[in-house]
Image (cartoon, rainbow, N blue to C red):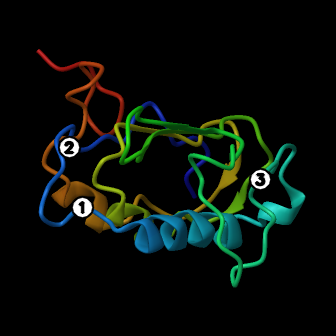
Amino acid sequence: RMAVIGAAVMSSMAAQASAATDSEMESALRALYDATDGASWTNNDGWGGSADSSSDPCSDGWYGITCSSGGNQKPRYILLSSNNLKGTIPTELAALTDTYVIHLNYNSISGSIPTEFFSMTNLGKETGYDDLGEAKE
């Protein structure tokens, strides 16, 4: 059981050929919502739209999502600490290759960090920490 996750999970700053499309980005975030009982989060503003509806985490102000500026906005930070998340981290989040930080600490997250996260080669470059929150030298 993993009680605390979150010092940082980060990835590429630059757009990559494998970067998630808007649809994949939304699907990855909805997978997090579904896997962690999003309806019971302390704050789930913006996340509750129907999966069939068109909702953009950046322009529609999903709680805990901070996006890049400019024309092609992508989630850079997923900050959902102390927000009553319960469940496991879905592997789909690894598709968010433009995301720098994912903070899910102080929730009831169980299981392990999906191995797919460890193939994200730029984890930790934004803040000087690696994917598990250890200070880089």
The x and y percentages for residue 4 are 58, 41
Quarter of the image with the N terminus is bottom right
* Labels 3 & 2 near each other (Cβ < 8 A): no
Instruction: Say which residue label 2 marks.
Output: 12
Whole-Å distance between the Cαs marked 3 and 2?
25 Å
The x and y percentages for residue 124 are 25, 32
* Labels 2 & 1 near each other (Cβ < 8 A): yes
Instruction: Say which residue label 3 marks.
Output: 46
Q: Is residue 63 left or right of residue 89?
A: right
In this rendering, is residue 80 above or below 48? above
Instruction: Say which residue label 1 marks.
Output: 19
- Three-letter amino acid code of the residue under disc 2: Ser
**Residue located at (41% from left, 58% from top):** 113
- Three-letter amino acid code of the residue under disc 3: Gly
| Label 1 vs 3, first from the N-terminus | 1
Could you classify mark 1 by the number of other residues whose Cα lies within 10 Å: few (under 14), some (14-19), or many (20 or more)?
A: some
